[in-house]
Amino acid sequence: MKKRVMLMAAAVIMAAGLTGCSGSPAKEQQDTTQTAQSTTGQESRESKETTTEADKKSGEKTELTITWWGSQQRAELTQEALSLYEGENPGVTFDGQFLSGADYWNKLATSAAGHTMADVVQMDKAYIKQYVDNGMLVDLQPYVDSGVIDLKDVDKTVQEFGKIGDGLYAVCIGVNSPALLYNKTLLTENGIEIRDNMTMEEFLEICRQVNEKTGYKTNLQYNNGTSWLDFFLRSKGEYLFGDGTIGASKENLTEYFNLYKMGIDEGWLINPSVFAERSIGQPEQEPLVYGSDPSNMSWCAFYFSNNMNAVTNAAPEGMEIGITTWPSDDAVKSNYLKPSMFFSVSVDSSQPEEAAKLIDYWTNSVECNKILLGERGVPVSSAVAEAIASDMSESDQKVVDYINNVVTPKCSMVSPASPNGATEVYDVVYKMEEKVCYEEITPEAAAEELLNQGTKILQSKQS
């Protein structure tokens, strides 16, 4: 049965990718506003390359730096996989650098500005273009052409995820989808049922019921990325970004911000002060699984499907985590499959081929993926997906079933990549959410502010 489920996942990727969806078409990345390599940065890399060649000739070890964001569980699994690679490749060692979401993106932007990026960087779809436009990522297509990176078992559609123009600047390392994770134990005990593809009004009614019956609040992805805003706008046939401007209407942005006002007025929205001493986006500190009493906990969390395992592991004993879709009045328009994340090679790497070999290993090694077990999303290699089927946990299989049987039948194409300036626009969104929650501004004023500030930011980035 397990193998059958995983084979279904492979079929989703091989036969469909994102195009298998019916219908029509994270904290996110800090904006890399710096231009392509400075003369100083170029000289630094040339010096590093010379040193590396000398080290190889003298038998010195090759050390690669790799950086990623995520949960503590991801950190442990990643380190274990890197140790396996070291054991299979004598002379290669890794300096693994792990941070929470917000800290990761800030550090990556800083290192990009100073040309000190890691050899291998975990990357998000929405921001690949920004890094490519600023000359920060290596084109991996030559390594695919030479066979260093083998993508023969990866569907062509999935390969396209990492392409910008004629170059391949990232390799997708998993497929996932927006997923509402929830305290199934709590809801079952209180006779509250959840259905997939619930409407917005159905979701709001559950928020009210849960708060009335249990005292638990709701967390509407507060200051933790804008994927929820994107999902909401998709149901209206809009995107946050247009051509050098904010693409959403004032009416729909007002409706979005009004969800926060409604939650505060009706008492079911978690108070933003709860996050003052927490790392937002860190599963172990998510109000769904962490808190002292119902008033500072949430019955649900807006995450992506690949977070299911980490949240399940972080949940206290006796709490079963359920998975369903984010609420929308048009499930087909809102739902989508997406690359969960990528690996890219930075232009600051003095050993890009060695870095490319690691990406190949991550993509094609069955033993490596028996450690990872889809923690970053359903493996993109059909051969690997089939091979690790029997090792999947119960929560992993729930995710595969969710991707295959809930999302894929009712979804559409993922939103276009975010433009330069997106990070600054996201910061405006966060500020508006905060101001609405603290009743410092009306939803209508928040929408107008986002439209005005956002458009100015985007237009300033156009050359």
Image (cartoon, rainbow, N blue to C red):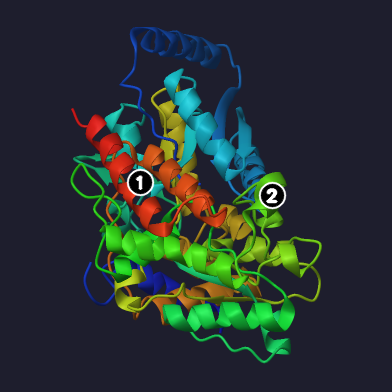
Residue 217 appears left or right of 431: right
Crowd band around label 2 with a 10 angstrom C-alpha radius: few (<14), some (14–19), many (20+): some
The amino acid on which the numbered mark 1 sits, given as a three-letter code, is Glu
Which sits earlier in the primary sequence, circle 1 or circle 2?
2
Q: Which residue is drawn at 50% across and 63% down?
A: 261
Residue 94 visible from this viewpoint: yes
Tell me the CA gap for discs 1 and 2: 37 Å
Q: Nearer the viewer, residue 443 or 129?
A: 443
Residue for badge 2: 72
Q: Which residue is drawn at 62% across and 39% down?
A: 99
Q: In this view, does 414 lie above or below 186?
A: above
Element class at badge 2: helix
Q: Nearer the viewer, residue 65 or 177?
A: 177
Could you say which disc has been placed on residue 449 in the image?
1
Element class at badge 1: helix
Q: Mark 1 or mark 2, which is nearer to you?
A: 1
Q: Which part of the image, by quadrant, shows the N terminus?
A: bottom right
Residue 353 appears left or right of 262: left
